[in-house]
Amino acid sequence: MSMPATDAATAAATATTTGRPEIVLKSSEFRKGRAEGWLELERLVTRVERQGIRRLSLDELQRLPILYRAALSSLSVARTIVLDRNLLLYLETLSTRAFLAVYGPRANPINGLRAFFGQELPAAVRSARWHILIAAITLLLGAVVGFMLTVQDETWFNAFVPSGLSGGRGPTSTRADLYNREIFAPWPGLVESFGIFAGVLFNHNTLVGIMTFGLGMGIGIPTIMLTAYQGLPIGAFVALHYNRDLTIDFLGWLSIHGVTELGGLILFAAGGLVIAEKILFPGRYSRLENLAMHGRLAGQMAVGAVIMLFAAAFLEGGFRQLVQSTPLRFVIGFGVGALWVAYFTLAGRRQAR
Amino acid sequence: MTLAHDRTSDFLEGGRRERRQIVTPEGVSLSVELADYGERLVAFALDLFVWFVLMLVIVIAIVSAIGVSGGSLIAISIALFIAFMVRNLYFVTFELAWRGATPGKRMVGLRVIDRAGGPLQPSAVVARNLTREIETFVPLSVLLTAGKTASGGVDWSNLGIAAWMLLFAALPFINRDRMRGGDMLAGTLVISLPKRVLLGDLVERKAKFVFTHAQLRAYGAFELQVLEELLRRQVTPDAMRLLTEVCEKICKKIEWTAPIAPADIMPFLREFYTAERAFLEHEQLFGKARADKHAKPGEEAAR
């Protein structure tokens, strides 16, 4: 590693020569008194990097910031008086490492995750309530348009619903088909349920939802368009069942996971809108600075959305066909929805003040 | 002096690192080195490998617990879920516990820092890592699995979406700070933090050769630091040949007429280095810093 011995040997900084005044190398003098402290700091920082800050004794913990500040001040001085490249680079790296050790994340992972889910995520969602409202209205508008068009002419259904999503349902389906094979289809058993769960992870809806978020970087217009586009198949499905007098049963069937899933999709879109807003209206900051300051909110909302989609997949795979009564489906669907709303509006208010 | 560093690296290693300034809460600006694309890719690959091995162990454990006959669908979906949990917890946990480094990043020598120089917040770590899911894993898994529909054909719309989303993975290539989407959102930066060792001072106190100020005025900080790097290299026949060449050039430049014995080349260069450094540091202290041999005293090098 480092060589204090060599250091001492060459530390005599005066070059005495016959017939010349003594030259004092300020940089060598400077180094002589301080190298000990740097090396001690380096040892401490290496230990913090390897084993974490908890392994330091109380004395060492007290030494760390003192040595860190001393190294910073050494660096400032060295920049003006030293031309030794190795020394300058060493001090620069050591200061950065010590800086990261002193100002590293304070929380342990458990506390970090607890703070995230306990306070930051709900706070982020609350702060974006207008974006959420806009996203929800957009989705609703899409659904209304899908409904209006499909109710009149069921051939629209094929245009709105991707083949992967329709699962054989369409204008040719009869009421009995939908009633027996879809809404009140028997529980397929544990294995099939898990299959649905796995399938939802790569669901078309999920992908488009994530896209609405990512497209926020494209100043929001694609987000709005895609969100409306996501509403279309929902409206088309409702219209299909409306024409066969199955509206209530279908809505119950849909609500058990749909409330959570649509919530997740809305959250994604709202996150995209937050990004778009921060890029479009940076205020007195540069766009990138503004994105960095507020982008965390959008990222947190996307995380919330992913979790909601997971929950929706779980409900869809596990509960939808297990519960065979429409009122009970409504209760579960909207009960879970109410839990989400309660979590996002109430959680973490006290600590956040 | 960062300028002289970079020029020296450029000259000797044929490349410099991109640098960014962060200001610590104490008000000192630190210059950090941006991580290279290659380094980040390697670190990510290493992390993926660790994750893959972890998953392999977990999946084997599940399969042996449930039994293969129990239905592959259950195993697959549980595995998918655990894979999701494990990789997210893996990145978040390590970056929080190891102060901005995962095992892969540590092996390569990378760290995640706050772009503004503040402490790295847990929320930033969570945000930058869970966006990775959206940026990389979802499009990748779609490209790998869901490109095919149930009927065996290719689902072009899904593939298109995935390809489109993978464009986000290209974000680091189109911004100056090489941030991916998650870094932008979280306000973080990935830097390279090489371990550097404090080497002994090259100053030679037993001076045999005497140089005049006129002779020392021939060079500037850049040449001094190149000479320092050369002197710090291991003494091999090759290095010796190079040093001999350098010695001849210096002699010519400073008009040193006395012959130098081959055995004296090292001492001569070290003493010249000492004298030159003493001279330049002294001049710099009096406001006459010299960046290189072309600069007039007191003038910064042309940027």
Image (cartoon, helix red, strand yellow):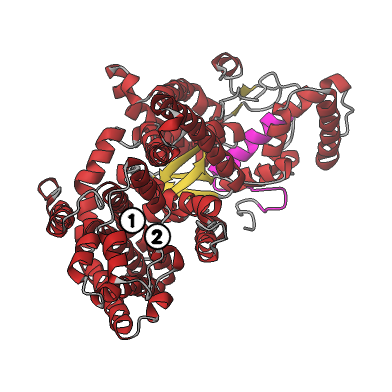
Q: Is residue A172 left or right of residue A330?
A: right
Q: Secondary structure at mark 2?
A: helix
Q: Quadrant of the N terminus of chain A?
A: top right
Mark 1 and mark 2 in contact? Answer it, CB < 8 Å.
yes
The type of residue carrying mark 2 is Ile
Instruction: Give x and y (percent) for residue A230.
Output: 35, 70
Q: Secondary structure at mark 1?
A: helix
Residue at 54%, 54% in the rendered image: B143
Range covered by the magenta-colored residues? B272-296
Is A113 in the magenta? no
Chain designation of label 2: A
Determine if residue B31 is in view: no
Number of marks drawn: 2
Q: Residues under labels 1 and 2: Cα distance?
A: 8 Å
Residue labelled with disc 2: A210
Residue situated in front as seen by the camera: B86 or A241: A241
Residue B187 location, x and y as percent?
Answer: 39, 52
The residue pinned by badge 1 equals A302
Answer whether residue B294 is magenta in the image. yes
